[in-house]
């Protein structure tokens, strides 16, 4: 499969004190079209930073990110914003729905901003609301919906522009386990049945187990990957994640503190 998303030797620095923080340290990976990929790591590993860079929400300091053959790191801020709006679907932990708009209006917003014909907006909105079993919530505002329903609206909105890639940043972080499983299953179904490409970051083995491949990030570096074998197997992912992290820690001890810090 061709890689629809290519991340090449990406570095990111943040100035948060006397010393800059090297948040990402030369990360490279490919996400083929029609794959459900997860990035798994603990808090502070750099996984959300990598997702934000992939969505053009934050500029890369070094390296390149190429989506559909276009290098977004070489784009101007304006062009990157337009590209994200038209070719990417971004889903956040906090849903990010506009509170004054109904579910129908929130879902249709990307095409409305792009001034698409109203007939097209209405047709696609109705189809997505039906797909995500939200038709009965079409005229409800976010405060009248459950967290799971709000996140399904957010995913429907992310699909409105037929994106090249859906980027999901801890999409179930605010949900209970039952609703979280529904969202993971929904993303998996979109990949299996519609050929959607998904890149999701998570710290949970339960969520990562729904992905085709899990890339393990630690201290801003990609240290290994886990092949799910097409199965939703939380124990397998959790065990492999522990093994990869343990192997990395052991290798670091063997290198020595001075060398590891270089």
Image (tube, helix red, strand yellow):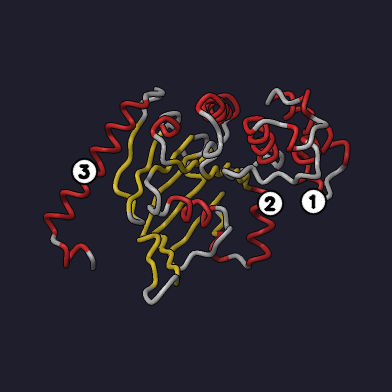
| Residue 203 locus on image (x, y percent) | 41, 41
Residue 246: numbered disc: 3
Disc 2 is placed on an element classified as helix
How crowded pointer 1 is (Cα within 10 Å; few <14, some 14-19, many 20+) is rated as few
Q: Mark 2 touching mark 1, by CB under 8 A?
A: yes
Q: Position of residue 184 (x, y in %)?
A: 52, 29
**Looking at the image, is mark 3 or mark 1 nearer the viewer?**
3
Question: How far apart in space, not on screen, are marks 2 and 1 (Cα)?
Answer: 9 Å
Q: Quadrant of residue 63?
A: bottom left
* Nearer mark to the viewer, of 2 and 3: 3
- Of pointers 2 and 1, the one earlier in the residue sequence: 2
Crowd class of label 2 (few under 14; some 14 to 19; many from 20; radius 10 Å): some
Q: Is residue 68 left or right of residue 224?
A: right
Residue 113's disc is 1
Looking at marks 3 and 1 on the same chain, the residue that comes earlier in the sequence is marked by: 1
Identify the residue shown where x is 74% and y is 24%: 130
Q: Which residue is mark 2?
A: 85
Estimate how packed mark 3 is, as few (under 14), some (14 to 19) or many (20 or more) residues with alpha carbons within 10 Å. Answer: few
82 w.r.t. 106: above or below: below
The residue closer to the viewer here, 139 or 127, is: 139
x and y percentages locating residue 16 in the rendered image: 44, 70
Residue plotted at (43% across, 50% down): 47
Q: How many marks?
A: 3
Question: Which element carries disc 3, helix, strand or loop?
Answer: helix
Q: CA distance from mark 3 to mark 1?
A: 48 Å
């Amino acid at each position: 499969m061709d890689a629809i998303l290519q991340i090449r030797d990406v570095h990111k620095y943040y100035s948060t004190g006397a010393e800059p923080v090297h948040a990402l340290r030369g990360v490279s990976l490919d996400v083929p079209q029609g794959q459900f990929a997860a990035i798994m790591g603990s808090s502070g590993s750099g996984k959300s930073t990598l997702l934000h860079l992939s969505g053009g929400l934050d500029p890369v300091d070094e390296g390149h990110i190429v989506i559909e053959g276009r290098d977004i790191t070489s784009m101007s801020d304006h062009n990157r914003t337009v590209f994200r709006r038209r070719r990417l679907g971004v889903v956040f932990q906090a849903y990010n729905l506009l509170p004054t708009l109904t579910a129908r209006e929130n879902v249709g917003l990307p095409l409305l901003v792009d001034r698409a014909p109203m007939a097209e907006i209405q047709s696609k909105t109705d189809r997505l609301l039906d797909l995500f079993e939200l038709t009965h919530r079409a005229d409800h505002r976010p405060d009248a919906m459950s967290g799971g329903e709000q996140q399904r609206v957010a995913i429907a909105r992310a699909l409105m522009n037929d994106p090249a890639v859906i980027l999901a940043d801890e999409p179930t972080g605010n949900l209970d386990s039952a609703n979280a499983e529904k969202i993971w299953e929904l993303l998996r179904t979109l990949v299996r049945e519609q050929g959607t490409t998904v890149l999701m970051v998570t710290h949970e083995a339960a969520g990562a187990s729904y992905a085709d491949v899990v890339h393990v990030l630690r201290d801003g570096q990609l240290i290994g990957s886990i092949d799910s074998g097409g199965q939703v197997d939380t124990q397998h992912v959790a065990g492999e994640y522990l093994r990869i992290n343990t192997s990395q820690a052991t290798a670091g001890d063997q290198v020595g503190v001075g060398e590891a810090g270089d």
